[in-house]
Amino acid sequence: MFQVRLHGRGGQGVVTAAEMLSLAAFMEGHYAQAFPSFGSERTGAPVVAFARISDHEIRLHEPIEEPDVVLVQDRTLIESVDVFGGLKPEGYVLVNSSASPEVIGLGDLAGRLPEGHVRTVPATDLALKFIGRPLPGAAMLAGFAAMTGLMRLESIAAAYGQKYSGKVAQANADVASGAWDWIKNGGNAQC
């Protein structure tokens, strides 16, 4: 079982991203689940959502304490919330930022995890470019897929295409494609 914890702020689409991740995994033939954990339900408040992906039925329903992956949609949470708590020794971290992990203070974390397991992606920049709103979910999921190799880019786009239609679906597919390219090109793709 692969467990993902998503951190962000209310209004950034954290819960939707977890749902889209589980839908994309389901489309690839996996068992999947997604669920949120709310504290204060207001825009800007810290939000955590969880997703599990497995080749077997998932019977767990509690919050994820030891994630394989941590996705951070708002890097300001790094200073105020223990977003990396319980991360497995071979885990992955993806942070929404155009700056490198070292520049945002994650050099020690990058040194503890396997090479390439701590990355950044300019998810909000991509969302603003293609969607016109700061909704980084599609970029974060595509970055996750590109980092881990667990899912295909097409599945991420298809999940958004199932929930949304027309221009919104295409904009999210474009965001996902941009993030995929960013990760695959070592953070050097054009935003």
Image (cartoon, rainbow, N blue to C red):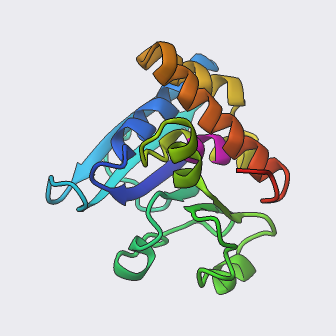
Question: Where's residue 70, x and y in %?
Answer: 53, 59
Q: Position of residue 54 (x, y in %)?
A: 57, 33
In the rendered image, residue 116 lying in the magenta stretch gets the answer no
Q: In the image, is 119 to the left or to the right of 127? A: right
Query: Which residue sits at x=58%, y=17%?
Result: 27
Q: Which residue is at 58% across, 65% downward?
A: 97
Expressed as whole percent of the image width and height from the top left, the position of residue 153 reads 70, 30
Q: Nearer the viewer, residue 143 or 85?
A: 143
Query: What's the residue at 42%, 74% (across, down)?
Result: 76
Note whether 182 is above or below 114 in the view shown.
Answer: above
| Quadrant hosting residue 33 | top left
Depth check: give the residue in front, 69 or 98. Answer: 98
For the magenta stretch, what is the residue range? 139-143
The N terminus, quarter of image: top right
Residue 3's spot in the image, x, y percent? Answer: 52, 48
Taking depth in this image into account, of 3 and 134 the one nearest to the observer is 134
